[in-house]
Image: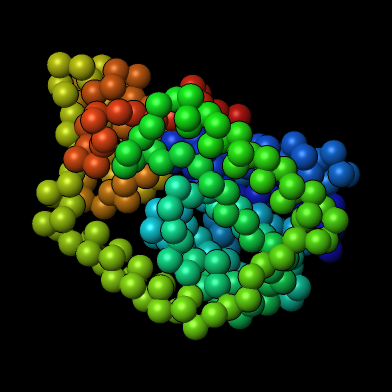
Amino acid sequence: MDKKIIDIYFFSGTGNTFLATETFANVISKQGFSVNILRLEKSDAGKIDRSHMIGIAFPVAISTYPFVWDFIYTLPKTDGTKIFILATMAGGSMGLVGKMKSVLLKKGYIPIGAYQAKMPSNIFFILDEEKNKKTRESGFNGVKMYAERIASGMAVWPSIFFFSDIAYFLYAGIISFWKWKWHQEFFRYKVNELKCVKCGLCAHLCPVENIKSGLNTFTEFGLKCQYCMRCISYCPARAIRSKFQYKNRVYKTTLLPFAHCR
């Protein structure tokens, strides 16, 4: 097993996790590690290289998005592949760390570290940029220390508690609620056709292919949205609106999201 190669599979909605992943990679690469940064939503979990160390980076929204959990559950069984997680969050994680550790142990992975970095909210109560910047800087400092602990073998993954299963059960109930048709229809994003330029960027960025957009049609949303806010944040015309938005504010941290990532 080549312990000096790390493949980090990340998903980032509005940029926090992407920047945290880059921060982590920059620090640990100086410790002699070679790091590949890969887009989780574009990757086949069943084809990961189990001879490499694996990292999973994602945002926390109550727990994390269903397609991120699908990626975890689809990972192949192994015999001792080291794995760590890097989560970004503005609130709680509903027992995610313990539940994810349990799933990975059963598949034969060695969980070597879990870190949840505090980041600004990208959906509810979006603060002004100066406050968000301070929160990000503090979060990235924590990520840097976490990268050093992973490199030195000193990182930890908290133990599994009974609470983790209870919290995950509650999360699963919330997610099933998300999938109800009436819920999706009620919270379906709206498009201002006077602003929409039919560029198709929203459809290209959607991790679950819930958006149809093209040169001859205005953006249309299906009924399987997972509310990652990518489309709203990166719409160049700011033509997409959600009932979740706080005072119609839009949060994003990068101008060209993930352009150089596979």
Query: How did the renderer colour the structure?
Result: rainbow
Q: Toward which corner of the image does residue 234 lie, by quadrant?
A: top left
User: At x 31% / y 32%, what residue is drawn?
Assistant: 232
Q: Quadrant of the C terminus?
A: top right
Report x, y in % for residue 141. 68, 40
Q: Is residue 5 above or below residue 190?
A: below
Q: Is residue 37 visible?
A: no
User: At x 37% / y 44%, what residue is drawn?
Assistant: 228
Report x, y in % for residue 50. 72, 63
Q: Determine the residue located farthest toward the right in the rendered image.
A: 32
Q: Is residue 176 above or below residue 118?
A: below
Report x, y in % for residue 46. 58, 63
Q: Is residue 245 visible?
A: yes
Q: Is residue 199 left or right of residue 59?
A: left
Q: Which is more toward the observer, 85 or 195?
A: 85
Q: Is residue 22 above or below residue 11?
A: above
Q: Is residue 132 left or right of residue 184?
A: right
User: At x 54% / y 80%, what residue is drawn?
Assistant: 161
Q: Toward which corner of the image does residue 192 lie, by quadrant?
A: top left
Report x, y in % for residue 115. 62, 56
Q: Quadrant of the N terminus?
A: bottom right
Numbered circles on residues, count: 0
Q: Is residue 154 above or below residue 87?
A: below
User: At x 65% / y 49%, what residue is drawn?
Assistant: 8
